[in-house]
Image (spheres, helix red, strand yellow):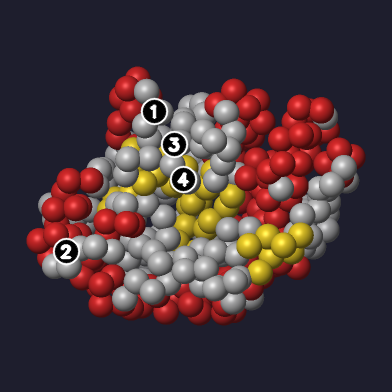
Amino acid sequence: MPFPELKKNQTQKLVSFWKHHPVADQKGETLAAKTLEFQRKFKCDFIKITPAGSWQAVCYGVADTWNGDSLGRRVITQNIIKRPEDWLTLPDFSKKQIPFFQEILKACSLVCQDSDDNTPILSTVFCPISQAIQMAGLPVFLNHIIEHPREVLEGLEHLTRNTLFIIEELIKAGSDGIYFVAQHMQDGILSPDTYKIFGEYFDAQCLDVCKNLLFNIFHIHGTNIFPAIGNIPANCYIHYEYASAANFSLSFLKKYEQQILVGLPLAEMVQCRNEDEIQQLIIGKSRGNIITSGCVLPLGFPDESILEWMRVSKNIS
């Protein structure tokens, strides 16, 4: 994969970190303000707009709350898919204004308008099957794919159409790329065969619509992950936390060698006490053109530590 030429004469690796912004992530203005504040402090090489992980499910009516989680994640308190027929009654986002989506769109627009330079901006979008599981809860979803697969697949088709609409609107608002998240591509949650039927086809459609953007990141979240993904566009990095890809075959890793983005393990990042330890962790466990963590930084990760990680990372050739 060609190194993305994001700034003139840039020769160093791209370095970027991000956090959730709980409470602030419920309104467009405050999410944008927190995103811009983070960027002005740390001057990352690309900006990731990070709404709550359940934001698309909330657009359908799911209720969630922040209970003080150290990473800033929100907990779903009320699902909306109860019966098989609920999959058949999802709204069409292109024909109905969705208030919470308008907040996320506003955040994107404000960040794109007010960022201080030409730093690329990536918007976070969750894959259809992750939205479906959030909307139903895992036990109901697993029951429905066995007892009522037709209804679930029709619902996933609808979720995909809405996700494509969301991506297109975020691009219109100024996003240079998409940070596309799969939360359930993990053994112990779904099997590879299940994901292939209910996830892979829909993920591929979403990635395809991003193929002409500056660059994208496909984040496979969690541990014991497996690559239930088809052809990945050449402008898309495959991002996962170090040591979380035990199920990736050598042929897969070889095929996408230039697109693999290994995130640094958070558990080890927080233990680094000086420049030498930071440098050793980066050299030993980072890979590719981008240096970042395996997922969001903890809310309590100190500003001075982020600045040190940025400085050391940028000085590694």
Horizontally, residue 65 falls left or right of residue 40, namely right
As drawn, the label of residue 312 is 2
- Asked which secondary structure carries label 4, the reply is loop
N-term-proximal mark, 2 vs 3: 3
- Asked which secondary structure carries label 2, the reply is helix
N-term-proximal mark, 4 vs 1: 4
The quarter of the picture where the N terminus appears is top left
N-term-proximal mark, 4 vs 2: 4
Give the x, y percent position of residue 118.
Answer: 37, 66
Return the residue at label 3.
224
Q: How far apart are marks 3 and 1 (CA)?
A: 9 Å
Q: How far apart are marks 2 and 3 (CA)?
A: 30 Å
Residue drawn at the location 78% of the way across and 34% of the way down: 144
The three-letter amino acid code for the residue at tag 2 is: Val
Q: Distance between the residues labelled 2 and 1?
A: 30 Å
* Viewer-nearest residue: 167 or 270: 270
Number of other residues with Cα within 10 Å of mark 1, as a class: few under 14, some 14 to 19, many 20 or more: some
N-term-proximal mark, 2 vs 1: 1
Q: Distance between the residues labelled 4 and 2?
A: 26 Å
Q: In this view, does 259 lie above or below 48?
A: above
Q: Distance between the residues labelled 3 and 4?
A: 7 Å
Return the residue at label 1.
248
As drawn, the label of residue 222 is 4
Horizontally, residue 19 falls left or right of residue 193, namely left
Q: Mark 4 or 2, which is nearer the eye? A: 4
Is disc 3 in contact with disc 4, using a CB cutoff of under 8 Å? yes
Give the x, y percent position of residue 109.
Answer: 57, 69
Give the x, y percent position of residue 213.
Answer: 47, 47
The three-letter amino acid code for the residue at tag 4 is: Gly
